[in-house]
Amino acid sequence: MKKLSLVAKIGIGMVLGVIVGLLAISIGQNEFVLNWIKPFGTIFVSLLKLIAIPLILITLIDGISNLKDMTKLSRIGGKTIAMYLTTTILAISIALLLVNIVNPGKYVSAEVRDELQTEFASDVELREEAARGVKESRPLQLLEDIIPSNIFQSMSNNGSMLQVIFFAILFGVSMVMTPEKETGVVKGFFSNMNAIVLRMVGLIMRYSPIGVFGLLAGLLVEVSADASLFVALGVYALTVLFGLAFMVFGFYPVVISMFTKIKYWDFMRAIFPAQMLAFSTSSSAATLPVTMECVEKKIGVSEEVASFVLPMGATINMDGTSIHQAISAVFIAVAFGHDLSLTDQLMIVLTATLSSIGAAAVPGAGIIMLVIVLGAIGVDPAGLALIIAVDRPLDMCRTVVNITGDSTVATLVAGSEGEKFKGGHGNFDSPNDKKARVSLKGIYKSLKGS
């Protein structure tokens, strides 16, 4: 079992969950599943909620505090942040447009929706209360609510995640503006805490196969294995994949063609080894060394730009994760019978943008960040049970989009600085530049070693 990858283990958990759920329904053992199997899924959701606030608080502070080089590269830093925020907001907007057109949540039958609403009746009440609050609120109430009056109180409630994000950004920026000799101990603390929190994420994701098994078995029993649920899940997964594919084969090619002289096919060939590693590991951080090698040696971006833009991208640029969060939030909300208002969808744009900035570049972090988005629109994070079974394959795909977006922005920034690219001459595979090669054999050894 130890030799199986996490993907395979989650797949096994998913299959076993379906089998046990269907078997329990056929022999009338629903109560057994709900009492003895579903709790393991509930524990998994609780673990995700447990780590959400520490993850985004510590990761954001650590990431921002590492941007000291912006004093030397203020021009490059400004362009980088502007481009990353622009692509993230556009990605979320595209995702919301797509999910509103397809609306995969509508494929959930009325019977299943009623059962879900009954199961999460408290969530429905909270949602209605939140809707009344929005209707009666002042025009700038959203901005008022982002500023916490008591950060410790905000950290005790996942629904106040925007306030935690605001505090983390304010704290991180203040660290950057404070002389380094006065922040060395604090910076070291958050750097070490970040390593510990990422280790916690890894431990939680090791438990994910059991959590998936419990969630799926319990969900099937609760909705009596209604076929509409599987149809809706399939349409949801295809919607996410289409949104991710559009970014890689539609949006990025247009941007590359408009602002550089590189042919997009050459660009894709150059970063393909990094894309393959990203797909295999589901981690932008693990892929970062290979991404930098491809961007510097095969595309021709200078080391100065690549070493600044790409590490920052692994921290704050998550186009693929943002697409997934937007589509997932709308899908879960509609499946639970919620009608999302324009305010809700704008909240998704804002929250998904900010949470993607704090998303750790490790496997499974995206699903944890989704807890933040769901909480912002008043949907119970337990709704993750609807999508957790197919999340791991989607995580692999969205990581490819994340590192492709990082590479695109690095290329655009370098181009805006007047740098010349190898891609303009199509010489990515120059036989005289052995260092420019990132061989498949090397990638295989990296994967095997990890």
Image (tube, helix red, strand yellow):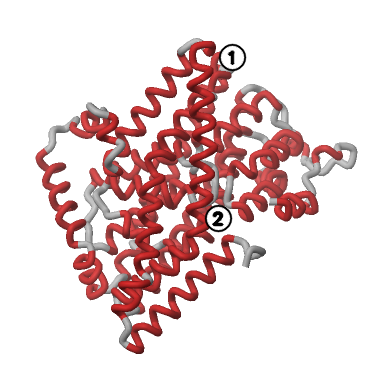
For label 1, the residue is 72
Q: Quadrant of the N terminus?
A: bottom right
Q: Would you place residue 377 above or below residue 295 in this image?
A: below
Give the farthest residue toward the front: 36
User: Residue 66: image x %, image y %?
Assistant: 54, 25
Q: Would you place residue 6 above or below residue 48 in this image?
A: below
User: Residue 335: image x %, image y %?
Assistant: 29, 64
Q: Is residue 102 visible?
A: no
State the count of labels. Answer: 2
Q: Amino acid at mark 1?
A: Lys
Which of these two is toward me, 120 or 54?
54
Dot 2: element: helix
Q: Residue at x 55, y 14 (%)?
A: 71
Would you say 215 lies left or right of 111 here? right
Q: Residue at x 73, y 37 (%)?
A: 293
Q: Amino acid at mark 2?
A: Cys
Q: Is residue 211 visible?
A: yes
Which of these two is toward me, 17 or 417?
17
User: Residue 167: image x %, image y %?
Assistant: 34, 27
Would you say 156 lies left or right of 37 here? left
Q: Which image quadrant is residue 408 in? A: top right
Q: CA distance from mark 2 to mark 1?
A: 35 Å
Q: Would you place residue 423 above or below residue 24 in this image?
A: above
Dot 1: element: loop
Q: Would you place residue 263 above or below residue 210 in this image?
A: above
Would you say 160 lies left or right of 82 here? left
Badge 1 density bin: few <14, some 14–19, many ≥20, Cα 10 Å: few
For label 2, the residue is 397
Q: Residue at x 43, y 61 (%)?
A: 388
